[in-house]
Image: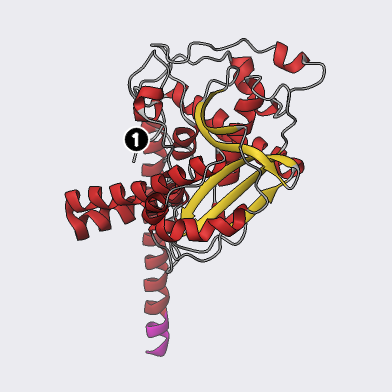
């Protein structure tokens, strides 16, 4: 009886193993036939989910480099633009089509990041570059320094600005948002008006000082070492080789050395150069245009200064940049400018904010 039971178990196990082997063979055979008919199975890798960049909890509208920078736009008005146009260059938008013409050959575009800040003694490098005097040609417009920095700003900063703008419009409405921007612009414009008179060697009237209120109070004590009258005040610039434009705030002597100066306003402390975001790059772009346009043939200028006046009236911060630092930021500017023209050519520039 026991032997019969063992025999049945062994038979069942053998039969089960045989059935499994048959099924495996059948599956293998089907797979073989499918592979012969349709080819091997293509396996896809699972896509990694990339977390969105985290922004600082203390982020405000003034944390965005382009917001802080763009609120200090030039006071040059439309009537002071070159006669070839009636609107500021920054207001122009490039058509987003692939293969757009640029003022540069492929070789020039590739070697743009080696263009000197200060003209070389031999002039060999500059001589290889043609002059792009088509300041406002139909084919390609000279972008302003602000336009270049806006278009090539880090994506995280761009998204932070877009979020801030959307939240402000939701809070204030479209008209309220426009009014807020107008007030910020007027605030900086009033300070520039006072500084223009002061730099020209005149004493600003009390009414003008009153309009600039705490900003003039903030910056006045920082002007002790600034020589006046200044050689250059609010001058429109154009780089004839690298084809960009801008407006430099001032060029004068500080403690016996000539500096290109940029005036900034802020609600928040800017105690280090890093805290001024793209301001030193902007400053070097202006100095490069001054040098290339022969504006400084009789004057040696290699230094820069950023004055940050505060709406609270606290003493302004002054950041002095020597020639070594200026060359470093100039190299960063050339990389941004190169990126701008490559993206312009390829039709991948972002939409203006």
Q: Can residue 268 be seen by looking at this rendering?
A: yes
Residue occupying image coordinates x 66% and y 29%: 113
Whether 287 is drawn above or below 241: the answer is: below
Residue 264 relative to residue 261: left or right: left
Choose between 249 and 63: the one closer to the eye.
249
Whether 135 is drawn above or below 91: the answer is: above
Residue 16 in the image, given as x and y percentages of width and height: 37, 67
- What residue sits right under mark 1 in the picture? 351
For the view shown, which residue lies furthest in the right direction?
A: 122
Residue occupying image coordinates x 34% and y 41%: 353
Residue 81 in the image, given as x and y percentages of width and height: 41, 22
Crowdedness near tag 1: few (<14), some (14–19) or many (≥20) residues, C-alpha within 10 Å = few
Magenta stretch: helix, strand or loop mostly: helix
Q: Which residues are magenta?
A: 1-6
Label 1 element class: loop
Q: Which image quarter: residue 252?
A: top right
Residue 145 in the image, given as x and y percentages of width and height: 50, 33
Whether 348 is drawn above or below 130: the answer is: below
Whether 248 is drawn above or below 28: the answer is: above
Q: Can residue 53 be seen by looking at this rendering?
A: no
């Amino acid at each position: 009886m026991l032997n019969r039971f063992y025999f049945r178990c062994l038979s069942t196990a053998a039969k089960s193993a045989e059935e499994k082997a048959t099924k495996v063979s059948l599956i293998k055979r089907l797979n073989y036939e499918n592979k012969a008919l349709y080819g091997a199975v293509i396996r896809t890798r699972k896509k990694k989910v990339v977390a969105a960049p985290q922004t600082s909890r203390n982020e405000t509208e003034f944390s965005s480099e382009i917001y802080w920078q763009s609120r200090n736009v030039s006071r040059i008005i439309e009537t002071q633009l070159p006669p070839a146009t009636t609107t500021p260059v920054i207001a122009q938008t490039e058509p987003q089509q692939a293969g757009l013409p640029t003022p540069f050959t492929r070789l020039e575009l590739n070697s743009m990041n080696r263009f000197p800040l200060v003209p070389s003694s031999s002039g060999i490098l500059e001589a290889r570059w043609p002059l792009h005097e088509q300041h406002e040609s139909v084919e390609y417009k000279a972008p302003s320094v602000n336009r270049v920095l806006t278009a090539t700003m880090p994506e995280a900063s761009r998204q932070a600005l877009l979020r801030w703008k959307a939240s402000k419009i939701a809070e204030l409405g479209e008209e309220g948002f426009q009014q807020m921007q107008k007030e910020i612009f007027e605030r900086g414009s009033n300070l520039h008006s006072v500084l223009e008179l002061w730099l020209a060697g005149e004493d600003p009237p009390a009414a003008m000082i009153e309009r600039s209120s705490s900003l003039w109070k903030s910056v006045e004590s920082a002007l002790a070492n600034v020589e006046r009258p200044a050689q250059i005040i609010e001058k429109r610039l154009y780089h004839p080789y690298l084809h960009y434009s801008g407006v430099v705030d001032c060029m004068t002597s500080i403690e016996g050395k000539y500096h290109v100066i940029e005036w900034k306003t802020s609600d928040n402390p800017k105690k280090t150069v890093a805290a001024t975001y793209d301001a030193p790059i902007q400053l070097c772009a202006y100095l490069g245009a001054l040098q290339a346009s022969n504006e400084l043939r009789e004057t040696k200028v290699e230094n820069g200064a950023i004055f940050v006046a505060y709406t609270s009236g606290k003493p302004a911060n002054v950041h002095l940049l020597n020639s070594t630092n200026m060359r470093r930021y100039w190299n960063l500017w050339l990389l941004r400018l190169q990126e701008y023209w490559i993206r312009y050519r390829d039709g991948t520039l972002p939409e203006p904010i």
